[in-house]
Image (tube, rainbow, N blue to C red):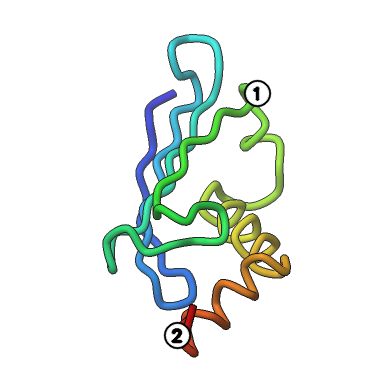
Amino acid sequence: MEKEIHRFTWQGIEAEVSYDPLFCGVIAHLEIKSINPLGAPLPITVTGYRSHFLPCGIIEAQDGSMVEQVIVWLDEEAKKPEWLRFVENNLQGELF
């Protein structure tokens, strides 16, 4: 299987995800990064970049495309109090 690279937009942030189903011949690898705005925080990374290793075949065994699965992951993480607090602080601006 070949490495896949896709772009998508999540909540106004353009992101890129690459998926290598057989990284180094032993594990699957996802790389997610925000590209516009570059380095914009995402619920799975405050730096705008996330490298994530998975057992081989797990993406293929799930329903939906790889991009759909990443979006579901982002949506789930965006419900967490830490992310909601981060969004609220950045909308209002932090005083301290």
Q: Secondary structure at mark 2?
A: loop
Residue 80 left/right relative to 67:
right
Residue drawn 38% across the image and 38% down it: 4
Q: Is residue 29 above or below residue 96?
A: above
Tell me the amino acid under the disc marked 2: Gly
Q: Is residue 10 above or below residue 92?
A: above
Which residue is more in the foreground, 51 or 65? Answer: 51
Where in the figure is residue 11, as x and y percent of width and height?
Answer: 48, 76
Query: Residue at point 36% right, 58% down?
Result: 34
Which residue shows up at 44% across the image and 23% down it? 1
Instruction: From this view, report whether residue 38 is shown above or below residue 19.
Output: below
Query: Sequence-wise, which precedes: disc 2 or disc 1?
Result: 1
68 or 13, nearer to the observer: 13
Q: Are marks 2 and 1 in contact (CB under 8 Å)?
A: no
Could you say which is closer to the camera, residue 81 or residue 52? 81
Question: Judging from the image, what secondary structure is the residue with disc 1 in?
Answer: loop
Give percent across and percent down for residue 85.
Answer: 63, 75
Q: Which mark is residue 93?
A: 2
In the rendered structure, the answer to whether residue 13 lies left or right of residue 62 reads left
Q: Which residue is mark 1?
A: 55
Estimate the spatial distance between the alpha carbons at disc 2 and disc 1, rounded to whole Å.
40 Å
